[in-house]
Amino acid sequence: MMVKTDWLLVVLLGLVLLILEGAEGRKERILGGSPYELAYSAINCRKHSASIKDFGGIGDGTTLNTEAFQKAVNQLSKYASDGGAQLVIPAGHWLTGSFNLTSHFTLFLHKDAVLLASQEINQWPLIDPLPSYGHGRDAPGGRYISLIFGTNLTDVIITGENGTIDGQGALWWQQFHLNKLKYTRPYLIELMHSNKIQISNLTLLNSPSWNIHPVYSSNIIINGITILAPVTSPNTDGIDPDSCTNIRLEDNYIVSGDDCVAVKSGWDEYGIKYGRPTSHLIIKRLTCISPYSAAIALGSEMSGGIQDVRIQDITAIQTESGIRIKTGVGQGGYVKDIYVKGMKLHTMKWVFWMTGNYGSHADTHWDPKALPEIKGINYRDVVAENVSMAGQLDGISGDPFTGICMSNVTIGLAKKSKKNPWACTNIGGISSSVQPPPCKLLADQGPKKSGMCDFPTESLPIDSIEMQRCSYRLNM
Ligand SMILES: *[C@@H]1O[C@H](CO)[C@@H](O)[C@H](O)[C@H]1NC(C)=O
Ligand SMILES: *[C@@H]1O[C@H](CO)[C@@H](O)[C@H](O)[C@H]1NC(C)=O
Ligand SMILES: *[C@@H]1O[C@H](CO)[C@@H](O)[C@H](O)[C@H]1NC(C)=O
Ligand SMILES: *[C@@H]1O[C@H](CO)[C@@H](O)[C@H](O)[C@H]1NC(C)=O
Ligand SMILES: *[C@@H]1O[C@H](CO)[C@@H](O)[C@H](O)[C@H]1NC(C)=O
Ligand SMILES: *[C@@H]1O[C@H](CO)[C@@H](O)[C@H](O)[C@H]1NC(C)=O
């Protein structure tokens, strides 16, 4: 009897093992079967992983995957309170319309993964204009939702091994040029009303319009992003932090048809009313090529205010201007406490540019008494070569731009430069060791040994956020 029991036990155990193995085998089949090691740095690692293939995604470049993406996000959102989830996009060309993200979620793109934005208009639902803009940017009514959208989220990561998101924007640019757009063009990535955002290690190609637009959000890190668009493509801004606070932009490389970084906070009376500034923004190690725009623009939409921006180690080549302030009567708001330290520029029209009569308005209801306050703009340690004009600094009559400080600035003028390298109106400030010597309105303080013009030494909370190393062994 003993023998028989033992034999039975062995058989039962074997059966259990077989069943377990079968389940394991099935799981592997669903996931495609080949082992895949993932390791990356992120603000949070995730307990659960899935592949877009698990949700019926097909990466053949022609099958539309919008439903697969939305299904994946909906399913994985169930893990939000259980360690969060990541959706892995394997190698392939994944055609998709717009989809929404969820909280405690990571979208990870394999190095050979390409998200291809659908060119069918019905894949782009409409959403309301931003309350701080009152209008869409291209047309008065609604706007097409961005390719990757999220609102009211916390802890969202979009990253990858330099995988690609291709907006296939040519069609949109053409519609824009033909003046055929009924609504405002979509962006590639927009996150609204969200907290704790990481967007890193991706390549963004040919956005229909702006590339990355965090708005009404906080605690944002955007790093290791390559953004490429033809330099003549309309409004293909790189990164536009808009009414956001605590932001770190680091090691980004941008070639585009508009400002590489454009700092914003709402438009005219709508932005004034919404009253949400962009503040505590760090921009480090940005490389920019944008022949018709600025490396970094502050404005033109700045009606909610822009304060405490720390810009360090900027490289720009064949770019229209280095740092540009764009504002005008009716904008209201402010741009103050701006600190720039370390710029290397080559082949520029202007190094410094302030425009007090930027005439872009949301509508005709702007308040002629809404004057912007531009104050405390500090630049130091700037080297520029082959420059047409050192600075064009135009404040507003009756509303001068004040507290401008420039020190340790060396500008090499191009052979065909303007006769007078500086032009200044309605501004005030000081300078030290600036070559060629600046306009009289920037009163020369003589050479200062330790340099002049503030740069804050105390760090911001966003500076001390450390990334974790996340590693996974998956079957994909
Ligand atoms: C995505 O979010 C927007 C804005 O909240 C909403 O209008 C849209 O219906 C959402 N899309 C899906 C597929 O849930
Ligand atoms: C998102 O957050 C904003 C600001 O807190 C709020 O006004 C809005 O109602 C929220 N939307 C949703 C869909 O929860
Ligand atoms: C990412 O890919 C882009 C486009 O191929 C390339 O230019 C860039 O150098 C890559 N970045 C990294 C960090 O490998
Ligand atoms: C992401 O890019 C940063 C540099 O910006 C690099 O240090 C890091 O190793 C990259 N991570 C991955 C997973 O490629
Ligand atoms: C002036 O700027 C250069 C970089 O352009 C930097 O190496 C140098 O230390 C700066 N000098 C002072 C006195 O800050
Ligand atoms: C200097 O700038 C001009 C445009 O102003 C450009 O045509 C020329 O190639 C540049 N020279 C160098 C050496 O980069």
Image: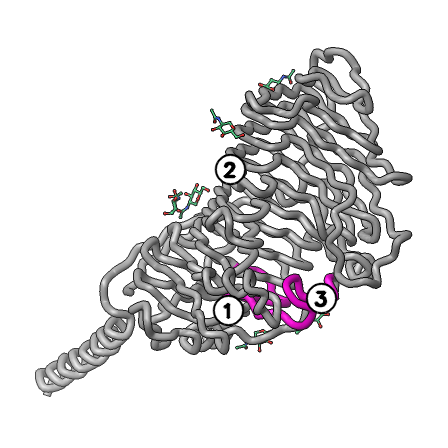
**Could you give the CA–CA distance between mark 3 and mark 1, rounded to whole angstroms?**
39 Å
Q: Residues within 10 Å of mark 1 (few under 14, many from 20)?
A: few
Quadrant of residue 20 within the rendered picture: bottom left
Q: Is residue 443 visible?
A: yes
Q: Is mark 1 within 8 Å of ligand 1?
A: no
Q: Is mark 3 within 8 Å of ligand 1?
A: no
Viewer can see residue 103? no
Name the residue: 29% across, 69% down. 60
Task: Work out whether 427 lies above or below 182.
Answer: above
Q: Label 1, on which residue? A: 82
Quarter holding residue 167:
bottom left
Q: Residue at x 70, y 22 (%)?
A: 420
Name the residue type under label 2: Thr
Mark 2, residues whose alpha carbon is within 10 Å: few (<14), some, or many (≥20)? many
Contact, mark 2 vs mark 3 (Cβ under 8 Å): no
Residue at the location (78% across, 53% down)? Answer: 303
Tag shown at residue 135: 3
Question: Which amino acid type is shown beneath numbered disc 3?
Answer: His
Q: Secondary structure at mark 2?
A: strand
For mark 2, what is the residue?
Answer: 287
Residue 11: x percent and y percent? 13, 82
Whichever of callouts 1 and 2 sits on the residue coming sooner in the sequence is: 1
Q: Is residue 402 left or right of residue 253?
A: right
What secondary structure prevails in the magenta region?
A: loop
Mark 2 or mark 3, which has the lower sequence index?
A: 3
Q: Which label sits in the foreground, 3 or 1?
A: 3
